[in-house]
Amino acid sequence: MTRLLRNERGQALPMALAIMTIFGILTAAITINGAANDRSSLKSADARQAFELAQSALAYGEGAVYAATTAPPTSLQTIPAQSGGGTGTYQINPISGSCSCTWFITATGTVDGVSRTITAIATGASSKTVTNSGVWNYVYADAAGTTCATSWNGSVTISVPILVRGDLCLSGSVNYTGSQLQVGGNLNVTGSARIGSASSKISQLQVGLSSTSTSTCNGVTPGTGVCDGSHSPIYAASVGQGIAVTPQMPCIGQPSSWDSQCTGANNGTWTTLKSTYATQAGLAQTGCPANLFDNNTTLDNSDTLISSVMFGNTDYDCKVGSNEIKWTHSSKTLYVNGTLYFDGSLTISGTIVYTGQASLYFTGGVSMGNNSSFCGITNCTSSWNPDTNGVIFIAGCWANSTGSTLTTSGCVSLGGGAAAQFGVYCTTNYLTSGGSSNMGPVLANTLSIGGSTSSLIPFHYMPPGTPLNTQTQSIPAQAPSSWSG
């Protein structure tokens, strides 16, 4: 037994040493692991804080985009110091597109050497200029500011949509049967004049520039009393206050003394006429007969041979840059394309059928009579499609060589049974009489409507060079998108 005990005593020391070594290793492992976990926890906390700083920096960047009146700063920006330390930065870069309003934002937060980066796209508020051709759906009078700025009498039946900026006074035996009548000022119907009938009401009557307008209809608020659409002399399925189209004749430089809407840069400068004339003068011309466009090199309303050359006995195919006018005298057919300027007036006679789409500018006026026709389809039928064959005549109405005086009556005139299928822009007075008719829209300062008007066929696609109104549209900011981080 004593020997056995001595043998066990000899083995205890190595075992104790082994056990102590194992415990030491375990203790070191636990200590190292705890330290590693502590470091990992600290790094994770730094990363979270860095991410929060990046979020804050992104918010600053988005705010810079949405608050900018022109463009936000595109250099690297540092946000103010945040609680808990660290730094936050953002940088804004433009994204190409239809507007300079969409931006790519990169935001970074850094804490104790740990960084997080996030990105997003922000689109700020913007605006764009667009053309407005709504007024070209009517026979339109721009005159305003005087009592009965537009007035018609006699025994004419008017069957086209009418829009007038100012007052409209109907008297005599005028009979309006068109689908839409829109009057920006006051409407007065007297004598034997009438609008629609009890058995055939017009579709829509609107009076006043806005829903809060004080304009009256035969002395009462539109839609009430004698102007409720159900009493003689005014019959309409719908009567309302406030016209549906903003009435504005695009100005081409005529003096405000004639058209009060044309002010500022447009007042008597004839900017559009001069620029169109100058543009054409700078283009290469081939096949163009003498005196077709001009008889000298000055805009002065002096070419008196335009009509005899344009519709003469000699064929021609005249190209001016990418614009073209071609005449075949045997078939009396005219092809037109683009924008063309003629420094004088035009008289149309005979029967002419045209093809193509164009805006034809004249320093003076345009007239038709003696059963003449100028149409975009054979026999001037209602199957005419102006989106395929459509011409706009633009008349400056100059009465002298500088435009300081204007032709104030019948600058564009249709009489003597003339039949027309074209649109008209007339700076002064547009006149129809003697059984004449025009199926195209008309913009004029004043209208003298007689003869026999026929159904108006609107242009859906205006020919190149057509005078058009422009307006600015506001586009609201969009919420941030494409977040990544």
Image: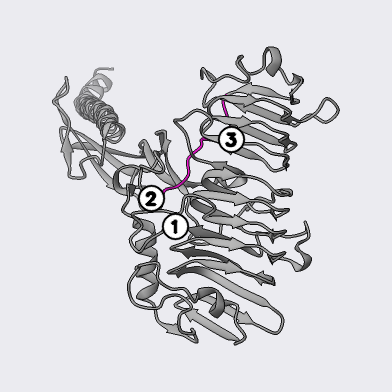
Disc 1 marks a residue whose amino acid type is: Gly
Q: Earlier in the sequence, mark 2 or mark 1?
A: 2
**Residue 150 horizontal/vertical position (percent):** 55, 36
| Residue segment shown in magenta | 242-251
Please name the residue that numbered disc 1 is placed on: 396
Give the Cα separation between the discs numbered 3 and 1: 23 Å
Disc 2 marks a residue whose amino acid type is: Gln
Q: Where is the C terminus found, in terms of image quarters?
A: top left
**Residue 131 horizontal/vertical position (percent):** 47, 48
Q: Where is the N terminus found, in terms of image quarters?
A: top left
In magenta segment, residue 243 = yes
- Specify whether 218 is left or right of 27: right
**Are the residues at dot 2 and dot 1 in contact (C-beta closer than 8 Å)?**
yes
**Are the residues at dot 2 and dot 3 in contact (C-beta closer than 8 Å)?**
no
Describe the element under mark 1 as helix, strand or loop: loop
Q: Nearer the viewer, residue 194 or 66?
A: 194
Instruction: Choose top left, top right, bottom left or bottom right for residue 68.
Output: top left
Describe the element under mark 3 as helix, strand or loop: strand
Using a 10 Å C-alpha cutoff, classify the residue at mark 1 as few (fewer than 14 neighbours), some (14 to 19) or many (20 or more): many
Disc 3 marks a residue whose amino acid type is: Ser
Residue under the point 25% across and 23% down: 8
Q: Nearer the viewer, residue 30 or 188?
A: 188
Residue under the point 45% across and 57% down: 397
Please name the residue that numbered disc 2 is placed on: 254
Residue under the point 65% across and 33% down: 181
Please name the residue that numbered disc 3 is placed on: 151
